[in-house]
Image: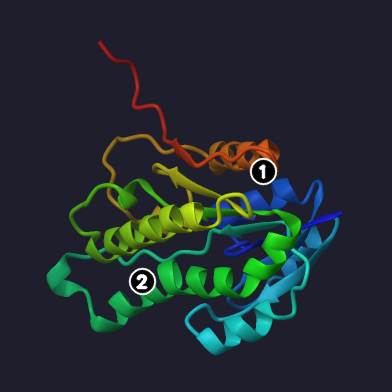
Amino acid sequence: MKKALVTGASRGIGRAIAEELGKDHHIYAGASKDASDIVGALPSAEPFEVDLTDTDAIVRAAREITELDVLVLAAGVLHKAPFTELTDAEWRESFDINVLAPVTLVRELLPALRRSRGLIITINSGAGFNGYPGNSAYCASKFALRGFTDSLRLEEEGRVRVTSLHPGRTDTDMIAGAQHGDRPKMDATQVVRAARLAVDAGPEAVVEFLRVRPVEGERA
């Protein structure tokens, strides 16, 4: 059975992807604290519990994984506030979790992924292309994640496939308090379908980029 590590697997998009890939993969279920709920819901899974702001802890946990086919970097944090109200701690956490944790995980797991000619999927955002008011830390971190992903894809060409997946507004607890007016949100299952497309495309083809967003409604 192939193996997949999904960070942020305890909730939201990460959980939805873990449940889908769990149909035909052994899942390392990433969570900051307790992964027992998602592990218990999957046919074959084990916890990957690690504080993504702790680089040493990430390294120790990743080095326990010697075989890996798919790495899905779905964990993320959103601090929504005007720039003048964001604290240094919120900026650091945004980059620690959204950028530096993925960098560390890729560095440690790249040998295993090269051996399997595997796949890395970064769950980015529309905020990786556009700035939005009240989202400066999140947008900056997602721009950085996109740059890392795009460069990694070029460097690993022919060895590891790399997909940058950019969901639009998705109905998860991360944006539950965000103000979107009457603009629609999509279910996480729509993001799952995009991720599955990238997984099923290989190993002889790579889906380099995917953008999926909710339909805005009828247009004239």
Question: Which one is nearer the viewer's eye here, 95 or 85?
Answer: 95
Tell me residue 46's x, y (percent): 78, 69
Of callouts 1 and 2, the N-terminal one: 2
Tell me residue 139's x, y (percent): 28, 58
* Residue at mark 1 to residue at mark 2: CA–CA distance: 27 Å
Q: Is residue 180 above or below residue 55?
A: above
Q: Secondary structure at mark 1?
A: helix
Left or right: where does residue 167 sit relative to residue 177?
Answer: right
Considering the image in quadrants, where does the C terminus appear?
Answer: top left
Name the quadrant containing residue 2: bottom right
Kind of residue at badge 1: Val
Q: Is residue 4 above or below residue 218?
A: below
Kind of residue at badge 2: Ser
Tell me residue 174's x, y (percent): 43, 58
Left or right: where does residue 204 sit relative to residue 74?
Answer: right
Question: Which one is nearer the viewer's eye here, 170 or 200?
Answer: 200
Image disc number at residue 199: 1
Q: Which residue is mark 2?
A: 94
Nearest-to-viewer mark from 1 and 2: 1
